[in-house]
Image (cartoon, rainbow, N blue to C red):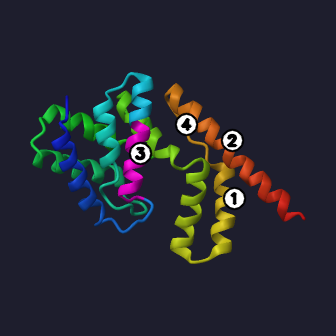
Amino acid sequence: MKITTKQWNEIERLAKKEYTKNNDPFHDYEHARSVSRLATFIAKKEGADVIVCKLAGLLHDLAPKKRGKLHAMESGRRAKKFLKRLKFDDEFINTVCSAIIYHDGSRSHLAKTLEGKIIYEADKLECYGPIGIIREYGDVFWRTKDHYQAFENLLQYLQKYNRHFFTKTGKRHKKELRKFSLKFVQLVKKYRKL
């Protein structure tokens, strides 16, 4: 399916409006744009549907994150409603929403399409490397307002966080970013001993 520039501008405008309702600064419109770019990059390398990945990446976090809730399912439901309003055909909508509903870690193994696996990977790549360091520290600090707790949490997170990826492209980039994260932990430990 092709999306015209006019349609894409309308999608971005409406998505930006929807993301302003989400009070989580780590799952905002800029995060969604980043995931969309990463998903597009991986899709091109892996031979997946680029339009589906670009759009699903942009819409994957429409629902606010709530601990213990099926955030990805709700995001898929909202994306479906959103895309119906824009008059896309049902088959395309279902393909995009299928990629969205499996983007969380607890359900990624259920993704049947390459596009669904790519949305999961693009979202999780944001949890590695420099962006992952900033996001993880910021998320804990935002919730606790405790710098030391956020920093300790960050170090533990960086050492343990190692999600399974599906595509060659995703695995390669995860490996590079994870290496950066582990080097960061190593440097912190080294300078704490001084």
* Secondary element type, mark 4: loop
Mark toward the viewer: 4 or 2: 2
User: What number is the disc on residue 88?
Assistant: none
* Secondary element type, mark 2: helix
Q: Earlier in the sequence, mark 2 or mark 3?
A: 3
Q: Residue furthest front?
A: 5
Identify the residue under disc 3: 35
Identify the residue under disc 1: 155
Gap in angstroms between the C-alphas marked 2 and 3? 20 Å
Position of 192 compared to 156: left or right?
Answer: right
Q: Residues within 10 Å of mark 3 (few under 14, many from 20)?
A: many
User: What number is the disc on residue 179?
Assistant: 2
Q: Quadrant of the N terminus?
A: top left
Mark toward the viewer: 1 or 4: 1
Q: Who's the residue at 45% across and 45% down the image?
A: 123
Q: Earlier in the sequence, mark 1 or mark 2?
A: 1
Q: Is residue 94 above or below residue 189?
A: above
Gap in angstroms between the C-alphas marked 4 and 3? 17 Å
Q: Does the magenta segment cover residue 145?
A: no
* Amino acid type indicated by mark 4: His
Mark toward the viewer: 4 or 3: 3
* Amino acid type indicated by mark 1: Leu
The answer to whether the residue labelled 4 contacts the one labelled 3, judged by CB atoms less than 8 Å apart, is no
Range shown magenta: 27-39
Q: Does the magenta segment cover residue 30?
A: yes
Residue 70 visible in the shown view: no
Q: Who's the residue at 81% across and 58% down the image?
A: 189
User: What number is the disc on residue 164?
Assistant: 4
Q: Is residue 66 above or below residue 176?
A: below
Gap in angstroms between the C-alphas marked 1 and 4? 20 Å
